[in-house]
Amino acid sequence: MTKIVNFPSKKSVTAKKGIAELPERLLSACEAPKYEQPSDDYYLDHILHAQMAKLTGGISPIAVGLAGFDWWAHLMFSPAKHQMLRQSLMNKTALISEYAIKAASGAKVEPVISAQPADNRFKTENWEKWPFNVMEQGFLLYQSWWDEATSGVRGASDHHLDVVSYAARQMLDVVSPSNSPLTNPDILQTTKEQGGKNITQGALNFMKDTARVIANEPAEGAEAFEVGKNIAATKGQVVYRNKLIELIQYEPTTKEVYAEPILITPAWIMKYYILDLSPENSLVKYLVDKGHTVFMISWKNPDECDRDIGLEDYLHLGIGEALKAVKSITKAPQVHGVGYCLGGTLLSIMAAVHARDGNESFKTISLLASQVDFEEAGEIMLFVDESQVSYLEDVMWNQGYLDKGQMAGAFQMLRPNDLVWSRMINDYMQGKRQPVYDMLVWNADATRMPYRMHSEYLRELFLKNDLAEGRFIVNDAPIALQDIRTPLFSVGTALDHIAPWKSVYKILLLTASDITFVLTSGGHNSGIVSEPGHKGRTFQIADVPNTAHYMPPGQWQDRTPTTEGSWWDAWQEWLMGHSDGKMAPPTMGDKKDYLPIRDAPGKYVMMK
């Protein structure tokens, strides 16, 4: 991959004094950086921005300021928009005034506005009682007015309007009546019933949680789950390790296995065992029990010594070396490739490399909640523009990686009502505790992102969309997704805010493969971890041959029938239909190059 010319190396500043002693200390403990620049003219900029980021939560104040100015300046010179907003405000004021008078009289009044389907703050019957119904309706009307004010401003960029709209929602959420114990009827009812004990218990919960955060300990109740014991517990062996991955081979549970093994590439943004949670919802165990030989890549949790590992290293040291090992151990000429989230993006890149170079190692490709086109990559794009990426690069330059807390904080900011405010209400005002379950424990077991890799990922995939547009470079030559002819199975999840399903659906535009596309209920994680028997699960599935005319995603959704249950069984049938019979299980590793190193789940998954 082409080197990024403005990547400063910490080694280049070791002669400086004061704060430059940090790079000297790091270099004494790490190998010399792989990518080194002769000098760093932006050293002071990096340090200043990295220190600023501690106060701004990693958000570039310039990026936010530019968005705000773009919106405000265009709004100021839009008299027609002013008039529409004034009229809307008067109409909404009249609506809430009439509603408040009728509600105060005790009459049953129909709501004048409804919350969004995903907004669960006002779902209980208590919000239908006066005066809380007036508070709820007033807040929703005020929120809708701000939605109007921060959208449809001619001349302002769509990205800046999205940022301003997002910022407005965050500020409005602070004053939502649901977030105050004085205006939330559910909290008031609990307080009355318990005589205030919930407030005392909530304070204790807050102090316990604060102490655990300071001590860097997991959430209360997480001790019931232990990696290798009751999560990530499918039996197997680590059969290969390098500086970036461990490769796990799982023990067969059937007398015969399908001829082609499965190699799973998970995302490196979190630990691999989202696909091997508890035995009852482990995708790995499901596949093994169905007669597949399964291999899993377990990524190392990088530190400052891995600062210069790039995206191409993840490709070659990750999938490349794992694929070589799988074929050597199983003696199979072809492999079923499976990728989840970013792992699916990386797998798509490798499939395009193979197509370009005439390598036919992949029998099929399965992409689970994975994007290859990042033009409409969901709410994460709020934090992706030149200003924000440059700011983030300075943060990573200073420490060598993007810290797991910074990553988790970004995702929490995307869904504050679900991940922040709801917990505050439940744990600290209601005095309750949400039950700790396997996925929650996994979600807290975050990883770091190497400086170089994450910068390349954000710039080349998100900012430039190089992969979808044929500019992505591997081994000094571009790759094209259109070269891929391998049969594809692609899964999108209906409520995904990280990889929106309509963005995932774009794979139909970008390859020449026969594709089976699935849209399943649930979100980015829950939609994939959708084991048979899981209540309420549904999915839609359709085969799209490469000769078919394109159908827009909304039209596809309307025309494709819905099936009750898990998509796993449909995927298993698809894999079976693309397999060449069965055979005796291969050995665990081999005696020559891939001797088993240790029991699964291995060493890297334990790294904090």
Image (spheres, rainbow, N blue to C red):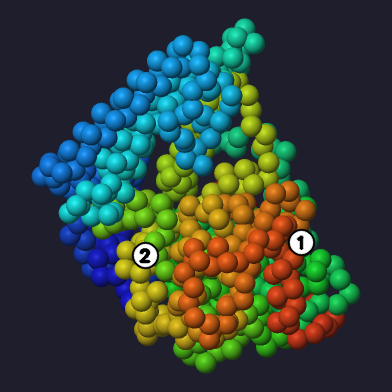
Amino acid type, mark 2: Glu
User: Camera-side residue: 542 or 33?
Assistant: 542
Residue for badge 2: 375
Q: Is residue 510 above or below residue 419?
A: below
What amino acid type should be assigned to the residue bearing mark 1? Lys
Disc on res. 238: none
* Vertical placement of residue 483 versus 488, above or below: below
In the image: residue 204, left or right of residue 101: right
Q: Residue at x 69, y 69 (%)?
A: 571
Residue bearing the label numbered 1: 285
Residue at image position (19%, 43%) is 81
Give the structural element (helix, strand or loop) at label 1: helix
Mark before the other along the chain sequence, 2 or 1: 1
Residue 410 rendering spot, x and y as whole percentages: 42, 46
Left or right of 300 on screen, residue 42: left
Q: In this view, which residue lies farthest toward the left?
A: 77
In this rendered view, identify the residue nearer to me: 510 or 251: 510
Whole-angstrom CA distance, mark 2 to mark 1, is: 35 Å
Taking the spot 36% from the left edge, 24% from the top edge, the residue there is 96
Mark 2, mark 1: which one is toward the viewer?
A: 2
Identify the element where label 2 is drawn.
loop
The quadrant of the rendering that contains the N terminus is: bottom left
Q: How crowded is mark 1: few (under 14 residues within 10 Å), some or many (20 or more)?
A: many
Residue 486 x/y as whole percent: 58, 84
Q: Where is residue 365 in the image (x, y as percent from the top left)?
A: 60, 76
Q: Are marks 2 and 1 in contact (CB under 8 Å)?
A: no
Q: How many marks?
A: 2
Residue at (42% x, 27% y) in the render: 137
Q: Where is residue 19 in the image (x, y as percent from the top left)?
A: 27, 46
Instruction: Give the image quarter of residue 306.
Output: bottom left
| Residue 37 in sight from this viewpoint | yes
